[in-house]
Image (tube, helix red, strand yellow):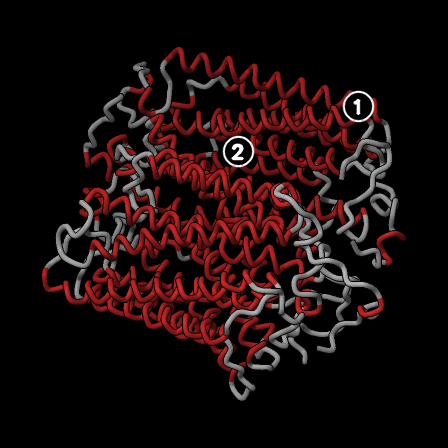
Amino acid sequence: MTQYSPKSAQGDRPASPSFYKAARGIGSWLYTLDHKRIGIMYLVFVLAAFLLGGVFALLVRTELLTPGKTIVDANTYNRLFTLHGVVMVFLVIIPSIPASLGNLILPLQLGAKDVAFPRLNLASFYIYLIGACFALYSLVNGAVDTGWTFYTPYSNTTDTSVISMVLAAFILGFSSIFTGLNFIATTHSLRAPGMTFFRMPLFVWALYATSVIQILATPVLAITLLLLLAERVLKVGIFDPAMGGDAVLFQHFFWFYSHPAVYIMIVPGFGVVSELITTFSRKPIFGYRAIAMSSIGIAIIGFLVWGHHMFTAGQSEIAGMIFSFLTFLVAIPTAIKVLNWTATMYRGSIVLRTPMWYAIGFLYLFTVGGLTGMYLATAGTDVHLHDTYFVVAHFHFVMMGGTMFAFLGGLHYWWPKITGRMYNETLGSFACLVAFIGFNMTFLTQFVLGAQGMPRRYYNYLDQFQPLHAFSSVGSYVLGLGFLLSAVCLLGTLFKKSDAPDNPWEGTTLEWQTASPPPLENFHDQPAVNAGPYDR
Amino acid sequence: MTQANATHSSNHGDGHGDEPHVLPMQVYLGVWAALVFLTIVTVAVSRFDFGSANTFVALLVATIKGALVVLYFMHLRYDNKLYLIILLASLLFVSIFFTPTLIDLHTRDALDPIKGRTMYKLSTSKAKSQDAAPAPAAH
Amino acid sequence: MAIMGREYHHAHHFPSARAEADAAKLGMWTFLATEVLMFSGLFMAYTAYRSTHAEMFKAAHQLLDWRLGGLNTLVLILSSLTMALGVRSAQQNKREQSAFYLVVTLLCAGAFLVVKYFEYTHKIHLGLLPGGYYTYNGPEFAGIDSPHIFFGIYFLLTGLHGFHVLFGMIAITWILLRTTRGDFSSKYYTPVELVGLYWHLVDLIWIYLFPLLYLVG
């Protein structure tokens, strides 16, 4: 912690009030330009959407307890898994780490007073809300049964409320673009004096890489969804075989966004885990530059691999071979990260607090998720595994075991900084353990189911799959219980007095140098930096 | 809240730092004249048959025009080169979008002509003519 | 950042006005990159069908009037010039001159949309519409596969571009009002510059649309 040279000591002047107390009233939240308040508003809505998507997930799993009808009919089931997907992808995971934790922490870690464009930041929050309203409108107005991928030609013909849901995703995309744009400009223009690019914390690097993907990929989603609307309203025929079009072309459009989008989801998680592992190993991170550069590497290679979603969809075999080869390349920067995290822990003085448990859980779950991705990237194996529960298990290991565990780890890590309150360490760790066990019960089972040939998205299944399905459903209840416990653990702190020290975890990055919670403009003095982010 | 930032007040009112970089009038008028001329060239080259290079020539002329707009009207020649990198990066990723998609569209019957002919509308015009595709309903 | 008076004060989370202007420009260029990527989707659809339906594109584009397309190209190029000159005048503290150039830019943009309106009504009259509404049955398309796709792409590309022209007009009107109010000077003209960048991109996209739609080789 020798990297800061504050221009004057903090003790010689009365402390500024925290940003909560700097202004009062509902208007001070609705019109706020403070990145911390905007981040908190995002956090509230992301967590609410997570609850909603989680309820959909539990309903899906409950329906799958027995073959045939358990609680809902087949059409409702189709809507449930679609809504689970749409809510989790567009309302939860994509904004989870960048828009909530990123908004809260990025300016703090850079030593800035705010993001570069505070009004754009607030606008992007309201755009997010408008998008969420469209999604809710679709939900009460018949919902959608296309799956979150909106594949043509079915999405042109189904009579569910596709248009409002597509508009929701379109609008949410703009929220994502503006957040990315803001973070790029912030990172370039508001770093503290002395903070070179290679003195930025790895969370900032990860958010920067994520922003680059958001900027380059999300516009293609926007145009894809516009084209989908044009297909539905004007019957343009570009994606409709009956009109001389090509349905697989839609999949190219869709996955050119949506594959990079999974890196929009996971790369910020990498950033969080980098912070957690170095802090709780009480050791500078191993391979700082390699981790920073591998984020950028993933961002770029992630654009070259989208065709692996289409091996069996009617894409040409030659394109399939190229995509298969390129997909394996993603393993390189990803492995660089995992190996560097492990090397950081090696001979570190590991302190096992709740955030570190989440980070360790992440390491295991993400590694399993990543390695099973290699099975699916092999075009030949994918013919067997495509559209089975193996795929479902794979991306839940990455998206949920990866991103959501990293998100929760980050939330527990920065909770004292955000709220000024410490949570019960025992309960927090126990909740993490329960979630971890529940997660593995739910999704390890699904690898087996998938390998045995259980197709995804099916309402009914053969009797022989029932024991594993039932086990998986019970696992999902355990998982839900784990999240409930962590919610109790964190939200319970809001009822007690502020008690968090400025730096409870002995972190070395700039956010730990200011008060918990920080004052309105983050730092009493403009911090200056003269060393790397993790030098102790 | 914080008044401690020393650089804050000292830099007040220094505007864009230095004086803005103003290009002479002739540069703008010259670029405009070149763009008008190249528009005529665009039409003229479409009258000649360069064979398979037709599209390439048309895009080449358009790109020259675009470069003039970007470099002079948008000031990129004199501005921070980071903006140029952003623009070129966007074009690079456009080409990443185009290349594999076009490879797919044009090689669907490369390994298995029968599958390529029967399953995919867009494949190649040769495959399509054998397919005797039904005309679209609205046609 | 309320700017009512003559003197501009930069937002206090930036160390200097220069840093603020640079950040704003970086943000604008990043936004322009998203615009390029967004249009690339439609260009992708264009390329996919042109490369597989070359004959159809050749036959279908002849129903577009290249003279009107060329006229619109010249109009937009002129508007780009006046926009650039508007920024230049703002840089030199010549407020009235800047306002004049912005008005000319607006007029050009309006003229562009008027020409576009006549083109559209002509197509709608003939029934040269996207997919489901396509009714044209002229002799040009005997033995030609799926000409409705060309017109679908035509309307999407020019429609999205036209929408950008419209949005640009709103943005130009906004900075025009602020110019006449006296917000800008050689010390602070960032919004004029940013709207200019946006407007040049709109021009740039049309420079590609013109040969690709009206002059298929």
Of residues C58 and B54, which is closer to you in this image?
C58
**Residue B124 in the image: above or below residue A523:** above
Which-is-in-front pick, marks 1 and 2?
1
Quadrant of the rendering where the C terminus of chain A is positioned: bottom right
At 39% from the left edge and 48% from the top edge, which residue is drawn? A87
x, y percent for residue C200:
65, 33
At 29% from the left edge and 56% from the top edge, which residue is drawn? A58
Question: Which label was assigned to residue C180?
Answer: 1
Marks 1 and 2, how far apart at CA:
41 Å
At 18% from the left edge and 47% from the top edge, which residue is drawn? B114
Q: Residue A534's quadrant in the figure?
A: bottom right
**Residue A250 in the image: above or below residue A194:** above
**Residue A19 in the image: above or below residue C179:** below
Of residues A447 and B48, which is closer to you in this image?
A447
Q: Given the image, on which type of amino acid does mark 2 rest?
A: Ala
Q: Is residue A214 left or right of residue C29?
A: left
Residue with the most extreme front position: A496
| Chain to which the residue tagged by mark 1 belongs | C
Q: Given the image, on which type of amino acid does mark 1 rest?
A: Thr
x, y percent for residue A93:
44, 55
x, y percent for residue A352:
50, 80
| Residue on which disc 2 sits | B58
Question: Which label was assigned to residue A79?
Answer: none
